[in-house]
Image: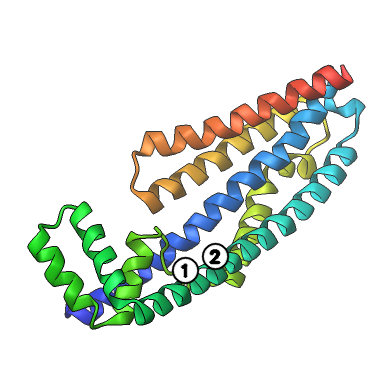
Amino acid sequence: MDWQAHRREAHALGRIQENLKQIIYGGNDGIVTTFAIVAGFAGAQADGVAQIGGMAVLVFGLANLFADAVSMGLGEFLSLRSQHDLYHARRSSEMHEIIQNPNQEQVELFEILRQRGMPPGEADTTANIMSRHPEIMADLMMTYEFGMFDPTKENPAVNGVVTFVAFVIFGAVPLLPYFLMDPTRTTFHVSVLATVAALTALGLLRWNATGEGLARSILETVAVGAVCAVVAYYVGWLVGG
């Protein structure tokens, strides 16, 4: 395999990982948000959800699901747009400084490189070379001085849509038993199992995207959902019990 093909494959993997990040972000919030509705209703009537009505669970659950999905998708869109604007504004300012005060910026880059462990002689040579390439120097300063990375490879609209879709797909899982079964206590138990399965699937996606430990990825994801579910259940129990 030649180096161009290898680079294309590596780039494609990076894009998949970026999409998975949005799936995990939206999916986790979708599951937790929707199951909180189900658990809250169940907790409000410890004798059984049927007394409240499965239709109420579906109406409130679906309304909350789509409202929050739109909010999350638009929030992701606006957040990334803001990152783009901030990055470009800061980089333009940095380019202006490099052009207007090249010696000062060269000294700053020298200090940054030296603080990161580069020997003084090599840091001075590198800073001197970079000063002759303002665009590259600006990128280095953005990363090392401001801790900002170029976000332009991420599309705000795509990220927003992926977050919205993940939120809806995963968030619908806790509601599925109420579409398929009568609203009894058993239905709530099935919803719990479906929610755990969805959180486990999300943990597997996280493990695939990040390469973290399998057990850690799954357990942390499930634990977050469990804490939120328990809180929602007992709040419902205290208010409605």
Number of residues whose C-alpha sits closer than 10 Å to that of mark 1, classed few (under 14), some (14–19) or many (20 or more): some
**Disc 1 and disc 2 in contact, CB within 8 angstroms:** yes
Residue 240 higher or lower than 156, as above or below: above
Residue at screen point 67% across, 24% down: 230
Q: Position of residue 121 (x, y in %)?
A: 8, 63
Query: According to the image, label 1 marks what residue?
Result: 151
Q: Quadrant of the C terminus?
A: top right
Query: According to the image, label 2 marks what residue?
Result: 83
Q: Position of residue 166 (x, y in %)?
A: 61, 56
Between discs 1 and 2, the one toward the N terminus: 2
Residue at screen point 23% across, 74% down: 6
Q: Is residue 70 left or right of residue 218?
A: right
Mark 2 residue type: Gln
Q: Is residue 137 left or right of residue 241?
A: left
Residue at screen point 40% across, 78% down: 95
Between the C-alphas of marks 1 and 2, the distance is 7 Å
Residue at screen point 40% across, 60% down: 146
Q: Position of residue 148 (x, y in %)?
A: 42, 62
Mark 1 residue type: Pro
Number of residues whose C-alpha sits closer than 10 Å to that of mark 2, classed few (under 14), some (14–19) or many (20 or more): some
